[in-house]
Structures are given as structure tokens and as C-alpha cells.
Image (spheres, grey):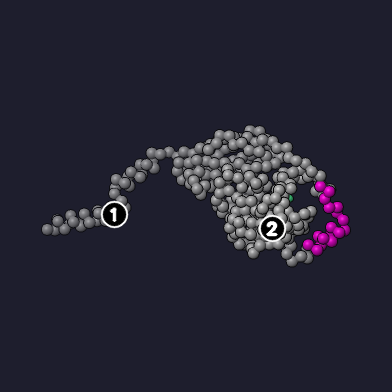
Amino acid sequence: MLKKDKISKFLFLFLSAVFIFGSPKNIFAEKSIHKEIPFKANFLSKNYKVRQGRTVRAQVKVNKRPAAVQVKFLSKVYNCLSNPKKPFIYECYIPIECEGKAGKIKLSARAKVKKSNWVYLKSLVDIKKVKFAKSVCFGYPKSKANLKLKNKAKKDKNSCKGGGFNRTMQRFLKKSPIKPMWVGAFGLPTKVNRYSTPFGEIRYSPNWGRYLHKAVDIVAPPRYPVWASHNGKVVMKCRYLYSGNTVVLDHGHGVFTYYFHLDSFGKIKVGDFVKKGKMIGRIGNTGRSTGFHLHWGLSINNEFVDPVEWTMKKFD
Ligand SMILES: [Zn+2]
């Protein structure tokens, strides 16, 4: 009698354990699968073709969830993140400088799962040299009137605080969330009647000498709505002497978009999260501008690239 009780107690405990932890066979099966399949990673392309001023989306395919995937290009290291639609593809965005090296350049990556060694990968980026258009700007002579304008801007309660634009952007970049806030291609920020200045146009001006226009100028009807080109956080909404009424959105993963010369702002404030298509302002002619237009820019790690490419299907 006592023995029977012991057996039934043992059986009860055994069955409870199976219920909670799964059958012993399954536990071992999972362990052996983990041991059997080695970690594999490879670049989706062995030759990324790109033009100067554009973006390479480097993609690494893995067979297991990795601990880290890093891509190195021209001594800069980029941390790749999993594509929200394809979790076994890890990707990062590499900005190609307008006047940087052209030709075939080495692209390397390393990936690993927990406690394993790094797996090293190789690919190439084939950069096509672009002959950017040239234009001469008459600019604005450094006159007394200009100084007056600068002083007026300082007193303007809506003027941007916290130092110059570049320094402010460096600060924002450090705070940009690691994870992207967007999924899929970006949208155009307004109605495009035409592009009055293409990306990368080389300009000569008396004020700044030679410089590249690293954005596109979109001509749209005056005061036409300007929309957020993708989900992001409003990090800047203020007035600069040159860019006029300015909005900057942080989309995460070091990607920012810029909207200059706005006539007025939409119902947004710094710190707001906006959805793609949210009205953030209206087409204007504020700051150093010679007509109603939108200066629309996009940067990755503070390197500006052609934003129009980001609206194309290949970024879906
Ligand atoms: Zn512009």
C-alpha cells in the first residue's frame, strides 16, 4: 500500500515537471540544435553600387539572432540593427561624401552571437564620381545692414539658442535614439512643383567662398503645407538668420531631416513625437531666401546625403 502511494506521488511529480518544463526529449532536442547549427552571417551584396552624395544600405543576413553586427567603412564603424520587416537582416546606413573617394572601396563587417568569436565578412562599395552642377551666388555683402539684422536676430525671442547650427546638431546626434523610429521609405515633405536647386550643387559666394548645397530646394505654392517626411522627434523649432524658420526632426539611428525657410510652424513643439505626414509648417521665404521654397535636407551621423533617394522604393 505504502509502495503504491510512493509510486503515484512520483508519477504525479514527474507529470507536473513535464507539464511545466516540457518533455525531457524536447529539452535535449533544443540543446542539441543550439550546438549543431553554427552561426553564419553574410553580406547581401558583394558589390554595393552608389553615387557620391547618396546612401549605402549595407545589409548582413544572419541565421541566428546575433549579439552584435558592425560594419566598417573608411575607418568609421556603424552598428547595424535588425530590419523591422525582416528580423534576420541587419542593416546600417552609410553616407557617401559628395567629394570623398570614388571607385571600389573595401567594406567589412563583423558579427557574433553571445560568447562566440567574431565572424568576419567582406564586401565592396563601388562609388561613382558625380559631376555636381556649379552656380555662382551673389550672396549678401557684409554690410552694416547685415550687422543690424544679426543683432535683431539675437533679440528675437524665437531665435535658436544654444550656439551655432553645427554645434547644436553635434549635441543632438549624441542623443539620437539607437533604434530607428521609421519603417520603410520616407515621404516627400511637400508638393513638388519643381526642384530649383539639386542636391550637391557647387556654389561660389562672396560670404562663404566655395561650398556645396547639401539639400534640395523644392518650389511649392506659397504657404503650402510641409509634412514630416517620416516618424520622428522634433528637436528644433526656432529661427536662424540664414535658414529662417527651421524645423529639425530626429528619426533615430543618427538620421535627421531639415526643413528651412518656413513661413510658419505647424502645431508642434520641441520634444513632440510626430508621425509621417504630420504638418510641421508652411512653405515660406524666411531667412536668407530669394523666393518661396523649402530647403529639405537629410543627414546620417551629421553627413548630408540626397534626401530624395530616401523616398524611393529601394528604401522600403
Ligand atoms: Zn537650399
Residue type highlighted by circle 2 = Tyr
Residue type highlighted by circle 1 = Phe
Q: Position of residue 277 (x, y in %)?
A: 60, 56
Identify which residue, 71 or 58, lies in the foreground. Answer: 58
Q: Residue 200: which disc?
A: none
Identify which residue, 305 or 77, lies in the foreground. Answer: 305
Number of residues whose C-alpha sits closer than 10 Å to that of mark 2, classed few (under 14), some (14–19) or many (20 or more): some
At mark 1, the secondary structure is helix
Q: Is residue 92 visible?
A: no
Is residue 61 left or right of 236 when viewed as pictured? left
Taking the spot 77% from the left edge, 54% from the top edge, the residue there is 291
Indicate whether 223 appears above or below 64: below
Count all numbered tags in the image, as a single digit: 2
Taking the spot 37% from the left edge, 41% from the top edge, the residue there is 33
Residue furthest out toward the right: 144
Is residue 12 left or right of 307 when viewed as pictured? left
Q: Which residue is mark 1?
A: 19
Q: Which residue is mark 2?
A: 224
The picture quadrant where one finds residue 146 is bottom right
Mark 2 Cβ and ligand 1 under 8 Å apart: no
